[in-house]
Amino acid sequence: MKKERGLLIVLSGPSGVGKGTVRKELFKQPNTNYEYSISMTTRKPREGEVDGVDYFFKTREEFEKLIEEGKLLEYAEFVGNYYGTPLDYVNETLDAGRDVFLEIEVQGAAQIREKVPEALFIFLAPPSLSELERRLIGRGTETEEIIQKRIETAKEELEMMSLYDYVVENDEIQKACEKINAIIMAEHCRRERVEKRYLSMLKGE
Ligand code: 5GP
């Protein structure tokens, strides 16, 4: 029987929402059965960061060569540095039937939506969205200006969300991780995926 291709999982969301923290927590858990794709970046390592563990640290020249050679599934410039996902690693891992987890910023996620529409897109949202609701219908202790600003931010975030399949509010790290794992599990049970597997089995593939 043909091996089912792994699932490409994309975790993204606005900057500062805690994507990195949630991702690190997910990979600390012993039962995590998806692979983290280590990104390439031109950013300098922070204290304690290890090449090949946290990122593959590259010069701008090296990174631009990777772009030219088509070695990146997606890439984006973020706060003056390039970040990108290595294409070969992702393809090889998916082909081997293992799920791949990407934790990337929103421009990169949008590129993947175009290239790999069957991927699973999870938007990590700030808890401010539910907080916002509470405050808006609350006792009106905020100034009009602050409320307006919050509404603007929430609208921008809502627009970003429209490319994603699921939204997880990062109000509590453990809860967010549980939700993400539940989404991944559910995605594997999606009728289309399971049906495809049965059909190819019946065809003797
Ligand atoms: P940091 O410099 O704090 O490690 O990461 C900055 C941002 O880059 C974060 O939002 C992180 O999710 C994003 N990022 C990390 N790796 C990649 C990648 O391969 N591609 C894209 N597009 N963004 C990435």
Image (cartoon, rainbow, N blue to C red):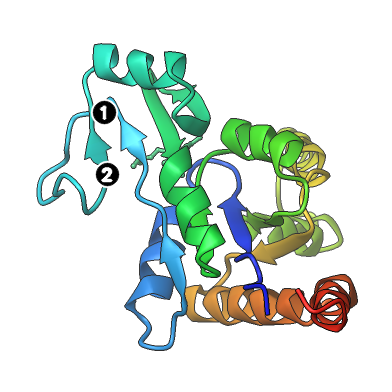
Q: Amino acid at mark 1?
A: Arg
Q: Residue at x 73, y 32 (%)?
A: 145
Question: Whole-percent x and y of residue 153?
Answer: 71, 37
Residue sitting at x 25%, y 50%: 54
Of labels 1 and 2, the one closer to you: 2
Marked residue nearer the N-terminal end (1 or 2)? 1
* Disc 1 + disc 2, Cβ < 8 Å: yes
Q: Which label sits on residue 55?
A: 2
Which residue ends up furthest to the bottom in the rendered image?
Answer: 31
Q: Is residue 74 above or below residue 47?
A: above
As rendered, which of 11 and 124 lies closer to the eye?
Answer: 11
* Residue 58 visible within the image: yes
Residue 38: image location, x then y, percent: 35, 49
What residue sits 67% from the left and 65% below the top?
A: 168
> Would you say 70 lies left or right of 134 here?
left
Ligand 1 quadrant in view: top left
x and y, in percent, of residue 116 in the image: 71, 44
Look at the numbered disc 2 and say if its residue's Cβ is closer than 8 Å to ligand 1. yes
Vertical relation: 204 (above or below) 43 = below
Q: What type is the residue that disc 2 sits on?
A: Tyr
Left or right: where 27 falls relative to 92: left
Characterize the local packing of mark 2: few (<14), some (14-19) or many (20 or more) Cα atoms within 10 angstroms.
many
